[in-house]
Image (cartoon, helix red, strand yellow):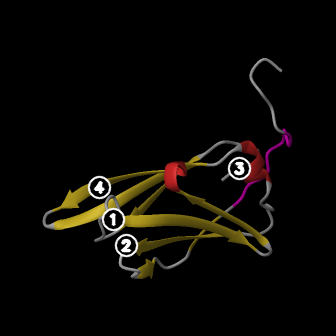
Amino acid sequence: MINYTTPAIPLIVEDRDLTQGQDVYVSFEQGPTELTKTGTDLTITTSSRGTITDSNIVLVLTQEETAMFNMKQAVSIQVNWISASGVREATEQKRISVFRNLLDKVIAYGD
């Protein structure tokens, strides 16, 4: 991930269908900096591998959100979900690198 960009972050949760009956949360953490995306922030679809169904999650971060993270340390990402019956599960944490943007400010089209 590069600071001050708007990346689409793709995630796969293997062997789980999170498209129905689940509230899904994707959390980013780097030291004291935390960000969680949920609900309409997430696009969740499924794909099949034989008899196994995986969930594909895509979310987009804003320029302000990617700017929150320091490029000297990796960001941890984890997916949590909870069913209507209260059963909560989570993935293992994964880490992604953060890279510096030479144009380190928020920009808009037409600036």
The residue pinned by badge 3 equals 2
Judging depth in this view, the residue of 85 and 5 nearest the camera is: 85
Residue contact at pointers 3 and 1, CB within 8 angstroms: no
Answer with mark 1 or mark 2, whichever residue precedes in sequence.
Answer: 1
Kind of residue at badge 2: Ala
Kind of residue at badge 4: Thr
Q: CA distance from mark 4 to mark 1?
A: 14 Å
- Height in image: 6 above or below 109? below
Quadrant hosting residue 102: top right
In the image, farthest residue toward the top: 110
Is 101 in the magenta? yes
Helix, strand or loop for the magenta stretch, by majority: loop
Q: CA distance from mark 1 to mark 2?
A: 6 Å
Answer with mark 4 or mark 3, whichever residue precedes in sequence.
Answer: 3
- Residue 47 bears which disc, if any? none
Kind of residue at badge 3: Ile
Q: Tell me the element at label 2.
A: loop
The residue pinned by badge 4 equals 46
In the image, farthest residue toward the left: 51
Q: Tell me the element at label 4.
A: strand
The residue pinned by badge 1 equals 21
Q: CA distance from mark 3 to mark 1?
A: 34 Å
Q: Tell me the element at label 1.
A: loop
Quadrant hosting residue 32: bottom right
